[in-house]
Amino acid sequence: MTGTPIHIALTFDDNFWAPAYATMRSVCLFSHRRSDLVFHLCHRTLTDAHRADIAAITSEFPVTLAWYDLDASPLFRDVAKRMPENKRLSNIVYARLMIDRLVGAEVERVLYLDCDMLVRDNIEKLYDIDMEGHPIAAVRDSIGAFITGGRDLRSNSDLFNIADPYFNAGMVLIDVQQWRAADLIGRMEKALADGVMARIYYDQDFLNLVFARNWLQLPWRWNTIDARHAHEGLDPAILHYTGKTKPWGVLSGMLQSVAFARLYRHVMTNELFYRFARHRWKRWWKKKLRLS
C-alpha cells in the first residue's frame, strides 16, 4: 500500500560499504514506492568517507536512512566476541539476530537483505505478501542438505532432518513481533552453552533450528542463490552472489559466469565500482605483505 513504510535492514562493515550501496540502489531503481523505503543500516568500522558514499543515495532517491553503529552496542560486542567466528564474513553476521532490538517498536515487518545481492523487481511485491501467520518467509537453499549434513549427509543428524526444507538466510522477511517473541539471543546463549553453536554453520543454521518447519517458503526467484549467467533468462527478482566469483570483480573472463555482472557495475556506478576495486586490491596486498 502506497504510503506505508517498507523497512529493509542490511548489515555490513567498512569493507563492504560499496556492495551495500549497490544493493540499496538496486532496490530503489526497481521500486515504484521509493519514498516509502526505509533502510536500517547496521554497520561497524565504517569510515566517514564511506558513510558519505552511502548517504549520497538520498540525493538521488527520497528514501529514509536509519543508522546503527554496532561498535557502540554493548550487546553486539558481547555476542560477536563470544560466538564462533566466521572468518570469511566476520561476526557481523550475528547482527541480524538483534534486528528486533534495533528498530523502533512501531516497525511490524522488516525485510533483511545480504549485501551481496542485486534486486531487479519491485521489492514491494515481496514486502507486502501474506505471510500466512508465519514468523518469517524465505527461500529454500539449494545446497541446504550439504550445509547441515556435510560429507555423506550424516553430520548433525541429531539437530537437523535432511527431509526438512532449509532456508537461505540472505533474504528473510521478518514478522518483528514473532521474531522478538522467539528470543533469539537468549536461545543462542543456550545453544552456545550446550555446544551447539560450535557445531553448526553460524547464524544461518541457528535460524533454521529456531524456525524449523515454521517458515513460509517463497519462490526461488526472490533469492537466486549462486547467481550465474544461465539464470538471466529465468527472470530472477533478487540475485544472490554466494559463489566465489563476485560481480564487483575486475577480471572480465571470470565475470562471464556471474548473472547481470554489467548491470551490477552500473547499479553500483562506475566511479564507486572502480574505487571499490582499488580498495580491495590494497587490502589484498597488505595481507600478502604481512604473510611474506
Image (cartoon, rainbow, N blue to C red):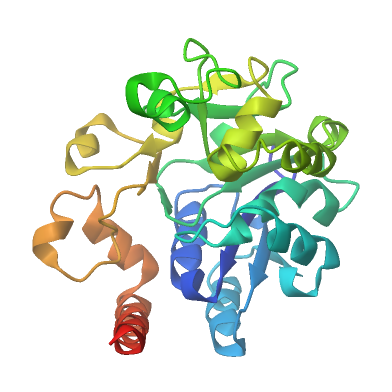
What's the residue at 55%, 33% (across, down)?
125
* Placement of the C terminus among the 4 image quadrants: bottom left
Residue 37 visible somewhere in the drawing: no
Residue 161 x, y percent position in the rendering: 53, 14
What's the residue at 39%, 29% (across, down)?
150
Work out which residue is located at the far top of the displayed protein and give it.
163
Q: Vertical placement of 98 versus 88: above or below? A: above
Describe residue 69's horizontal placement relative to residue 49 as left or right. Answer: right
Closer to the camera in the image, 29 or 256: 256
What's the residue at 84%, 67% (across, down)?
74
Describe residue 229's horizontal placement relative to residue 264 as left or right. Answer: left
Q: Quadrant of residue 207?
A: top right
The tally of labels here is 0
Closer to the camera in the image, 150 or 181: 150
Residue 102 x, y percent position in the rendering: 81, 56
Closer to the camera in the image, 70 or 129: 70
What's the residue at 48%, 69% (across, down)?
16
Q: Quadrant of residue 142?
A: top left
Residue 285 x, y percent position in the rendering: 29, 86
Work out which residue is located at the far left of the displayed protein and give it.
253
Work out which residue is located at the far right of the displayed protein and give it.
105
* Placement of the N terminus among the 4 image quadrants: top right
Describe residue 196's horizontal placement relative to residue 168 as left or right. Answer: right
Q: Vertical placement of 172 versus 210: above or below? A: below
Q: Vertical placement of 111 versus 209: above or below? A: below
Describe residue 136's horizontal placement relative to residue 193 as left or right. Answer: left
Residue 1 visible somewhere in the drawing: yes
Residue 267 x, y percent position in the rendering: 36, 63
